[in-house]
Image (cartoon, helix red, strand yellow):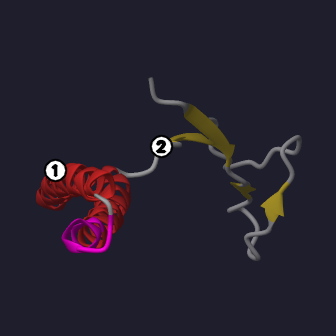
Amino acid sequence: MQSIKYVDLPVLDVASSDFSILGRDRSASTSFPNHRREYNADPSPFCRDLGNQISENVQKHTSQASKEANKSVAKDSHASIGTRATAAKDMVSDKLDENRHAGKEELYSAKK
């Protein structure tokens, strides 16, 4: 459900030569009867998709960095077997997250 907001636009006195703005309760001889315009308060789909694309890009790179860190822990011969196994599991999870975020980023970029 989109929210709609109304804006009161000033009424211009076009009868006078200086085009001064009249107050709301004053009337002009050539004023417009309906001076309220409606506009959509939601951000444009372009801005929303651009924001989502940037967010997915950041999350993709975060997952990539975490994957590389877990990869180095999994290869470390001085770490215990449990630590290496956990790091390998986390590395696979981070790789899946990276691919998921890359796909969403591509989807949002294709919408533009």
Q: Secondary structure at mark 1?
A: helix
* Picture coordinates of residue 24, whole percent (x, y): 83, 45
- Amino acid type at circle 2 is Asp
Few, some or many residues within 10 Å of mark 1 (<14, 14–19, 20+)? some
53, 49: nearer the viewer? 53
Q: Residue at x 16, y 50 (%)?
A: 96
Q: Quadrant of the C terminus?
A: bottom left
Q: Which mark is residue 96?
A: 1
- Amino acid type at circle 1 is Leu
**Left or right: where 55 falls relative to 103:** right
**Above/below status of 56 relative to 4:** below
Residue 22 at x, y percent in the picture: 83, 56
The stretch in magenta equals 70-79
Q: Is residue 75 above or below residue 81?
A: below
Looking at marks 2 and 1 on the same chain, the residue that comes earlier in the sequence is marked by 2
Which residue is pictured at 61% across the width and 36% down the height?
A: 5
Residue 10 in picture, x, y percent from top left: 72, 54
Seen from the viewer's position, the closer of residues 98 and 109 is 98
Disc 2 target residue: 42
Label 2's element? loop
- Are circles 2 and 1 on residues that touch, CB within 8 Å? no
